[in-house]
Amino acid sequence: GEDVEQSLFLSVREGDSSVINCTYTDSSSTYLYWYKQEPGAGLQLLTYIFSNMDMKQDQRLTVLLNKKDKHLSLRIADTQTGDSAIYFCAGLNDYKLSFGAGTTVTVRA
Amino acid sequence: DAGVIQSPRHEVTEMGQEVTLRCKPISGHNSLFWYRQTMMRGLELLIYFNNNVPIDDSGMPEDRFSAKMPNASFSTLKIQPSEPRDSAVYFCASSPPGELFFGEGSRLTVL
């Protein structure tokens, strides 16, 4: 199955950009996702990228995919306090979505 | 659209009791998933249904766990008997091809 790895913690100053990195093992993943989880809540789909793309931008979010290195990143521009959460990357292979352990992002004033 | 609806949101029970978690997927989604989230193991896929049929239950921990999907709008995950190590947040998710929508989760505490 897919192994997905992420760094566990990221601290960023309000207004700066955040970059969350993820590596995956299964090159046949068709879609790669970023989910956000706030305390006590479910996972909210932030954005996703199809495996034949290398970049996708959606307002403050930019996803970069390096398929050769199996590396996925999420950049959040102008990080706000409301962006404090756990961010999960996930890869889809057939029907199975394999999640990383999540990166806890803390936004400090 | 109301999204994926799970109940109960919180359940506290004693070891040995039966627990039933419920899920109403988004109308029109043909796939349904049950996930379990713990600090130690992260998010684990328990079972996957497609068109109400269980396709992959390899993630179900043991025979104490069972899941059903009697129709396209309802699924249950049952634990009988429950044990303290079952304490976790259980998520239901539904999907058209390529995108997963999660419910808010059911937080289970087994004492």
Image (spheres, coloured by chain):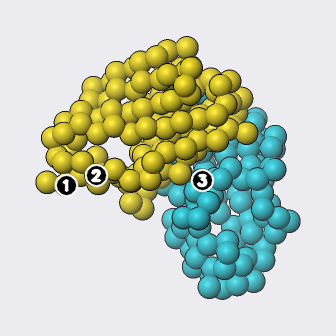
> Mark 1 or 2 closer to N-term?
2
The chain in yellow: A
Q: In the rendered structure, the residue with mark 2 lies on which chain?
A: A
Q: Which mark is residue A11?
A: 2
- Kindly indicate whether the residue at mark 2 contacts the one at mark 1 (C-beta within 8 angstroms): yes
At 73% from the left edge and 76% from the top edge, which residue is drawn?
Answer: B82
Decide: is B74 above or below B21.
above
Q: Quadrant of residue B77?
A: bottom right
Distance, label 3 to label 1, CA atoms, is 27 Å
Residue B68 locus on image (x, y percent): 78, 53
Q: Nearer the viewer, residue A5 or A87?
A: A5
Kind of residue indicated by mark 2: Ser
Disc 3: which residue: B43
Distance, label 3 to label 2, CA atoms, is 23 Å
Q: Nearer the viewer, mark 3 or mark 1?
A: 1
Kind of residue indicated by mark 1: Arg
Distance, label 1 to label 2, CA atoms, is 7 Å
Mark 3: give few (<14), some (14-19) or many (20+) Cα within 10 Å.
Answer: many
| Element on which disc 3 rests | strand
Drawn side of residue B23 relative to residue A50, left or right: right
Q: In the rendered structure, the residue with mark 3 lies on which chain?
A: B
Q: Quadrant for the N terminus of chain A, please.
A: top right
Which shade is chain B? Answer: cyan
Q: Nearer the viewer, mark 3 or mark 2?
A: 2
Examine the rendering and report whether any part of residue A82 can be seen.
no
Kind of residue indicated by mark 3: Leu
Q: In the rendered structure, the residue with mark 1 lies on which chain?
A: A
Q: Nearer the viewer, residue B99 or A53?
A: A53
